[in-house]
Image (cartoon, rainbow, N blue to C red):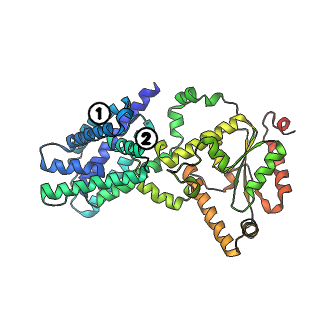
Amino acid sequence: MEKLKRYIIFIIGLFISSFGVSMVTKADLGTSPISSVPYVLSLRFPFSLGEFTILLSLLLIVLQLAILRKNFKLEHVLQIPVSIAFGYFIDFSMMLLGFVEPNIYAMKLAYLLIGCVILGIGVYAEMLANVVMLPGESFVRAVVHTWKTDFGITKVVFDVSISVTAAILSFALLGKLSGVREGTVVAALFVGFIARFISRRLAFLPQKLFRQGQAAAGGKEAAQPGICILIGRQYGSGGREIGMRLAEKYGFRFYDKETIQTSAGTTGCGFVGLSESEEILPRGKVRDLLNQVYAFPENDSPKDNVFAAEAAAIEKIAAAGNAVIVGRCADYVLLDNAKCLSVFLFAPTKHRIERVMKTEGLSKEAAAKRLRQMDRQRAEHYRYYTNQIWGMAANYHICIDTSFGLARVEKIVDEALGYLGQDGIQASLS
């Protein structure tokens, strides 16, 4: 039943995507990169946009076979019927939109943006179903897996190559530039961004739609979570030190970034550069625009793969019980775990600057700059994966000013654990 549900959602998403492609094309400001070559060819030869889309898709499937060889699996063959359906969906959508013939630039721009939104919705539905990929994205994945390249960069190179090819064909066959304009750039930049934006806003939907299958596959509902203290912290507030102190006091296991990465198997993931860049979301927003993920399952995005792996590791740690976990959005990952106490540690800026000056040997100006940078990065990272405000009191059980001293922090945590009303918690801490 779940498999049928996924395929129904996928087919719906495929049709919505075809409608979006058609709307973008009818806007007459260029079409999406993957459709640019078929569109140019359809202007010169007696075949439709959808039919040329099918032919291009079949070519990309053959190229995947050449690249993957023995790694070409049966699931890749499913791209053939999907490509045929997508091509004819495009032709049907183009027929439905036959009345769309904008003459003024403002209307063209409006249709273009509407088309991008529709295409983004369709892509999200395909991502949600997570059953098969379209040949364009599957081809990029084949390149990435074979030569270990970065997906975002490879996808950009692929889209640029397709668009340049379309431009060359346009001049050669039509004597002018058609199919590749500003609308191509807009679609390339924003469709994937829109799909991921929707995906993050509807993060709860997969669990609601496919709950039965997830429970059967992972057995998460049957797991008995243990007691955990989850610590979020401002930079320079002493959160890691306090976490270690609490773990030692209660006899709990201690987990921070390094130990969680080790547990998740994400340490040394060169394709992500996690330790240097995972929390830098101003740069991550640009990555969103460039890392084309339309019709590409979200959990195949390398950076998101790492987060998913670490979230799974955190859930496993919590199930084993009695642990202190510092950072890693653990309060969000374990939001529904009744046996977890979430704590946010903060301190006045002056206190934190002085602490960083002492622990890192920085000048006052350098320490203040470091504080601003790290807090901004952590806030953006937290917002990106949780859609919540980092450090907002409502997201935690307690927020503590660490400038009152470690003894005071420990006493507050003791009292909070006692008031959670969890069965056996006092016995475990005694």
Residue 382 falls left or right of residue 163: right
Assign a secondary structure to mark 2: helix
Task: Tell me the crowding category of disc 2: few under 14, some 14 to 19, or many 20 or more residues within 10 angstroms, Cα based.
Answer: many
Amino acid beneath label 2: Met
At 68% from the left and 52% from the top, the residue drawn is: 394
Q: Quadrant of residue 132?
A: top left
Q: Residue 176, percent across and down?
A: 15, 61
Q: Residue 175 has which mark?
A: none
At 83% from the left and 43% from the top, the residue drawn is: 250
Q: Residue 118, percent across and down?
A: 36, 48
Q: Residue 408, percent across and down?
A: 85, 56
Image quadrant containing the C terminus: top right
At 30% from the left and 43% from the top, the residue drawn is: 18
Q: Residue 188, percent across and down?
A: 35, 54
Is there any visible trace of residue 114 in the rendered image?
no
Count of all numbered marks drawn on residues in the image: 2
Image quadrant containing the N terminus: top left
Q: CA distance from mark 2 to mark 1?
A: 18 Å
Is there any visible trace of residue 183 in the rendered image?
yes
In the picture shown, does residue 41 fall above or below 66? below
Task: Tell me the crowding category of disc 1: few under 14, some 14 to 19, or many 20 or more residues within 10 angstroms, Cα based.
Answer: some
Assign a secondary structure to mark 1: helix
Looking at the image, is mark 2 or mark 1 earlier in the sequence? 1
Q: What is the residue that sits farthest to the right in this orientation?
A: 430
At 37% from the left and 51% from the top, the residue drawn is: 155
Residue annotated with mark 2: 127
Q: Residue 80 has which mark?
A: 1
Amino acid beneath label 1: Ile
Nearest to the observer: residue 86 or residue 422: 86
Nearest to the observer: residue 384 or residue 96: 384
